[in-house]
Image (tube, rainbow, N blue to C red):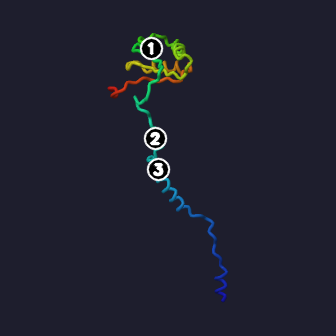
Amino acid sequence: MPAMSSRGGSRRRTMNEINMVPFIDVMLVLLIIFMVSAPLITTGVVDLPSVGTARTQPQHVIQVIVGTDEQLKIKLDGDQDPSPVPLKALAARVKDAQKGDAATPVVISADRNVKYEAVVKTMDVLQRAGIQRVGLAVKNGAPADR
């Protein structure tokens, strides 16, 4: 019996370490799955309006025309001929034409050969004056030649 007692008296050591290899394997598999599936997920679809789909045109529109010589002209609804206006006086003339109605849209029409900078300056002057509805005029039809 002494052999039995010596055998029963030995205890198993408890294992204090966790095997990290299976954990790392699972994490690498998840990482690969996310790396492969991330480009396939669309973050959101933006439905942009197309040109020419407006139902009705506004009754009162103020048109600012930027000519090829970068001279500004302003055209109201009833006017046949646009009247020239300097850039410094543009905001005041547009506000007078709006007659206190801030919802009146202002459309900037620029010649195709005008520098982009001239159009941006015109928009900047109008927006700094607090005119909220400023847009750009486009031509309906086939895309422009490039």
Residues marked 2 and 3 touching at CB (< 8 Å): no
Measured Cα–Cα span from mark 1 to mark 2:
41 Å
Q: In the rendered image of this protein, does residue 86 appear above or below residue 4?
A: above
Measured Cα–Cα span from mark 2 to mark 3:
21 Å
Mark nearest the camera among 1 and 2 is 1
The amino acid type found where label 1 is placed reads Gly
The image shows residue 76 at horizontal and vertical percentages of 46, 15
Quarter where residue 48 is shown:
top left
Q: Earlier in the sequence, mark 1 or mark 2?
A: 2
Between 80 and 35, the one nearer to me in the picture: 80
Mark nearest the camera among 1 and 3 is 1
Residue neighbourhood size for the residue with mark 2, other residues' Cα within 10 Å, grouped as few (<14), some (14–19), many (≥20): few
Q: In the rendered image of this protein, does residue 127 appear above or below residue 93?
A: below
Quarter where residue 79 is shown:
top left
Q: Secondary structure at mark 1?
A: loop
At 45% from the left and 50% from the top, the residue drawn is 37
The image shows residue 64 at horizontal and vertical percentages of 46, 17
Residue neighbourhood size for the residue with mark 3, other residues' Cα within 10 Å, grouped as few (<14), some (14–19), many (≥20): few
Whether residue 72 can be seen here: no
Between 41 and 54, the one nearer to me in the picture: 54
* Label annotation for residue 35: 3
Residue position marked by numbered label 1 in the rendering: 78
Q: Is residue 99 left or right of residue 118?
A: right
Q: In the rendered image of this protein, does residue 130 appear above or below residue 55?
A: above
The amino acid type found where label 3 is placed reads Met
At 52% from the left and 19% from the top, the residue drawn is 126
Question: What is the quadrant of the N terminus in the image?
Answer: bottom right
Residue position marked by numbered label 2 in the rendering: 45
Q: Earlier in the sequence, mark 1 or mark 3?
A: 3
At 38% from the left and 20% from the top, the residue drawn is 112
Q: Earlier in the sequence, mark 2 or mark 3?
A: 3
Question: What is the quadrant of the C terminus in the image?
Answer: top left
